[in-house]
Amino acid sequence: MEKEIILAKYGEMALKGLNRSIFEDVLMKNLRRKLRKYGKFRLTKAQSTIYIESEMVNVDLDEILEDLQRVFGIATLCRACVCEKSMEDISCKAISYLEDDLTTIDTFKVEAKRADKLFPLKSLEICAELGGDLIDAYPHLKVDVHNPEFIVTAEIRDQYAFIHGADRKGAGGLPVGTSGKAMLLLSGGIDSPVAGYRMARRGVQITAIHFISPPYTSDRALEKVETLCQELTAYCGNIAFFCVPFTEIQEAIKTHCPDGYFTIIMRRLMMEIAQRVAAKEKCLALITGESIGQVASQTMHAIACTDAVCKIPVLRPLVGLDKTEIIETARRIGTFETSTLPYEDCCTVFTPKHPKVRPILDDVEKAQGKFDFSEMIEKSVNGTTLKIFTVETN
Ligand code: ATP
Ligand code: MG
């Protein structure tokens, strides 16, 4: 049987603006963490490619490939057959390795990539020779250089040559951990998990924070958010999850502040608490799932009033997206089903009938000033609990 490996290519584009060795080190680390649950692998890097070799027999490379398609920083992936650097071995291996593909298609072409410029044949000559050998072996095949059903790729590298069929699309973006750490305000809704995914794709390591208001919110509601966190690890890597008791604060807003300002005051207090936990955790920014105009608390006026209490940047990667676009992503990354489970979130419990759609900062500050929340904020921060969700258990 042929020896098979996985090639994960990151391409030069992704490296722009980032230190190459940091990019590669973090990507290798993320891949290793992801692969741990599948057994032992040897990883090496050369020419913008990471070579992933299994040290075991009987591994399901397709299952692993599918999982690796969720690792940010990789442009394309494929499984490939390892060949000696001779045309005889390349042709011979290609004929048997690609048998399943070549017997089910009619037109193909060969593409050759010659990274080793000392290889005696030039790319076009490799294509001609390998193409000829494949047609000899499978006489029904025809070459179609413009619109082939299947592309056979031969790559001549430093130590070996590789043969493979179609590339799979990688997750793109930057390796998680190359852009610093930020704190995601994670609710049980559809939007915030997508927001976390989006920022992780830009290399940001995600720490999550969630506000609960028992007995108004149930254990099931919390379990749902924990499930979302676990689901996100497939893309975001390990996630530290902070859970904040928020009942007292919500009751105090309800009791002491004018009704129409409930939501905006609550959001400001969430931000106050989140940025304190963020500071302790060395997070450089907050992330929310807000999108302009989606609900009353997400008008530009409301966002301005919320931002007024934030001393670190608030990243809102969904700000210009429609709900349908957000839902599309949620479905694709596998969080939609969990997000649409029915359990109540703390935001919906006390929501006023007529929230202020265009709050003015002065009025909001006056409304919030009816009560001194500082002690309660302190208490919530101190009552926060931590749970870690890891990639290996996903
Ligand atoms: P989502 O679908 O993310 O819940 P939403 O459309 O329901 O968003 P809001 O309820 O206004 O919008 O919440 C806006 C943002 O505030 C959320 O995207 C999330 O980042 C944050 N948030 C809301 N509720 C909580 C909570 N209980 N814990 C942590 N963050 C929250
Ligand atoms: Mg919500």
Image (tube, grey):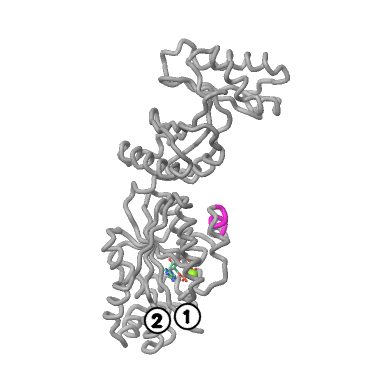
Which quarter of the figure is the N terminus placed in?
A: top right
Mark 2 sits on what residue? Answer: 250
- Magenta stretch prevailing secondary structure: helix
Q: Position of residue 178 (x, y in %)?
A: 34, 46
Residue found at x 48% / y 58%: 194
Q: Position of residue 38 (x, y in %)?
A: 48, 41
Residue 94, which numbered label?
A: none
Front of the two marks 2 and 1: 1
How many C-alpha atoms fall within 10 Å of the one at disc 2: few (<14), some, or many (≥20)? some
Mark 1 sits on what residue? Answer: 216
- Judged from this view, the residue extending furthest toward the top is 120
What's the CA distance linking mark 2 and mark 1? 10 Å
Which portion, as a residue range, is magenta? 327-332
Foreground residue among 126 and 34: 34
Q: What is the three-letter code of the residue carrying label 1? A: Tyr
Q: Circles 2 and 1: CB distance less than 8 Å?
A: yes
Image vertical order of residue 180 relative to residue 257, above or below = above
Q: Is residue 188 magenta?
A: no
Q: Secondary structure at mark 1?
A: loop
Q: Position of residue 2 (x, y in %)?
A: 55, 23
